[in-house]
Every structure is written in C-alpha cells, then in structure tokens.
Amino acid sequence: MSGSLVAKGVAGMLLMILTALQLGALINDLELMERRNHLVAFLFPVAMAGIGTDGLYDPALLGMPFVLWSLRLAWRIDNTGKALQPLFDAGLLLGLATLCYLPYALVLIVLWASASVIRPFAWREYLLPLLAIGIMLYITWALLLLSGFEHWQPLHTVMNSDQHAADLFGSTPRKAFMALLVVLLLVALAAFNASYARSIIRGKNLRSAFMALALTFVVAMLFLRLLKGSFPAVLAALPAAVIACYALLQPRRAWLGEVAALSLFAIALWVRWA
C-alpha cells in the first residue's frame, strides 16, 4: 500500500472517529434521548461500515463535523434568550460544511425549522444563517480569486464519484446488514414515538428538529440518487445510528438489544472483510 493510500486511510478513520464523538456529544448534551449514553458513537461507524463501500473518505464525511457543530449551536437556543449570535455562528459553520460538500446548504432548512419550533417568529433569526453562509462562500471565492484560482467549481464535490458511496443491497453480507438494520429501525421508530410523547416541550422541539434533519438527508439522498446514481454513506448512516439507539437503549428484554447490537457489529465486520 502506497504512502498516499495510508494517509487517506488514516484521515478517513480520524474523520469518522471525530464525527462519532461529536454525534455522541450532541445527543448527550442536548438530551435528545432519555438517558445519557455512548451507543450512538458506537453505532455510527458500524453503520458506515455496513452501508458504505470500500472508499476511505469523501467530501461529505469531511463536512459532517461542521454540520454537527452548527446544529449543536442552533439547538442550544431557547424561547427566551438571545439567538442571533448562535444562529449566525451556526450559519458560518454550515458555510464551511457547504464548502466541503455543496448539498449541506440544504441543512439551512433545518436551522429554520429548528428556530420555528423553539422560538417565536423573528425574521432576523431566519436571515442571519443565510447571510452567514453567503459570507463564507464569498470570502472563499475572493481568497481563491486573489490566489489566482479563477475557476472555482464547488459542484465537483457532488458530481465527482463518491469515494465512500452507499451500497445498500450489493453483496450477501450487505443484504443481511440492511435486513437487520431495517427491522431495528422499525422497532426504534415506535420507541422514538413513545419517547416523544413522554418528553417535555423542549424535548419535543429538539426531537422534531432532528426528524427535520433526517428528512432533509433523505431528500438529499433521493435527489443525488436520481442525479448521479449514488449518494454518500454518511447521509444514511448518521440518522440511522441515532434512531436505532432508541430501540437498543430500553428494550423490553435487555438480551435482545445486546444481541442486535453485537449482530450489527459482526455483520459490519463481515461486510468489511468478506
């Protein structure tokens, strides 16, 4: 293996670990689940291994830490405190994510949806994230122009072949992984609905904001599938890992949850090494 491939492999692994840790911190700090846990940080790389192809990393994975950081700032606001600065900062971070992978601009809709369910309407809170994204893109364009790069093509982050594209129903191990994951997600959706019903108003708002994020990723995946025939695995792995946690945290029989988690891990290893 060449030094370049080793460097890419290490970079991809570090990005995956960073994203998993950030995702776990986001879930725990904002109490998106009824008790703190690190299960989501375990399930995210398992989902990436089971869903993704053999690529090392891609622009979507590179930009995901900025997306999670942006959401963490936006979801911390409440219905009484100041929100302009957190939303502007969230927009700047989302602008950085958009520089890495252009479809992340759609997450702006999630910021708007989050503000709409958490706070009363204020037009500046919807304008500032959009302005921040525009500022980040403009600064990047200006710096590239001053450096002599006149042909900036951000669409290349989308149209180039995905190095870690999703492969949902390829080999037999992947089919087994997807079958177990689908069953787990169906159980998890029922658990998510029960958790939503038990939660207080802020808990309901944050869960609604997360479902808006998941729906945005689904729309992006469908669009990319129609446009180019593939989509990055991280768009499917992240919401799947979070939702699946609801089925594993408080199962009716603890041993079933343990068997399901270990089975996902074992099949993901099978996918990687088969």
Image (spheres, helix red, strand yellow):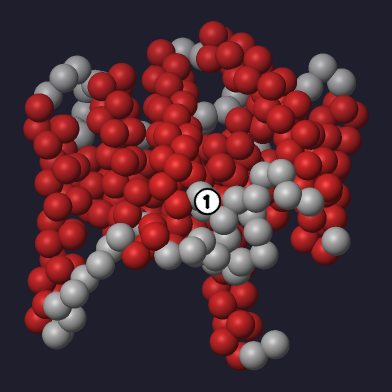
In the drawing, does residue 168 fall left or right of residue 18?
A: right
Which residue is situated farthest in the bottom direction here? 3
Relative to the observer, which residue lies in front, 255 or 82? 255
The residue located at (61%, 11%) in the rendering is 194
Residue 217, given in percent of the width and then of the height, sits at 45, 38
Q: Is residue 227 visible?
A: yes
Q: Tell me how many marks there are.
A: 1
Which residue is identified by label 1? 230
Identity of the residue drawn at 57% across and 60% down: 164
Among the 4 quarters of the image, the one containing residue 65: bottom left
Q: Residue furthest top?
A: 197
Could you tell me residue 103's position as x and y percent? 35, 49
* Quadrant placement of the C terminus: bottom right
Q: Is residue 5 left or right of residue 154?
A: right
Is 175 rendered above or below residue 244?
Answer: below
| Residue 210 falls left or right of residue 52 | left
Rendered view: 173 above or below 140: above
Residue type at numbered disc 1: Ser
Name the residue rendered at 61%, 30% in the picture.
243
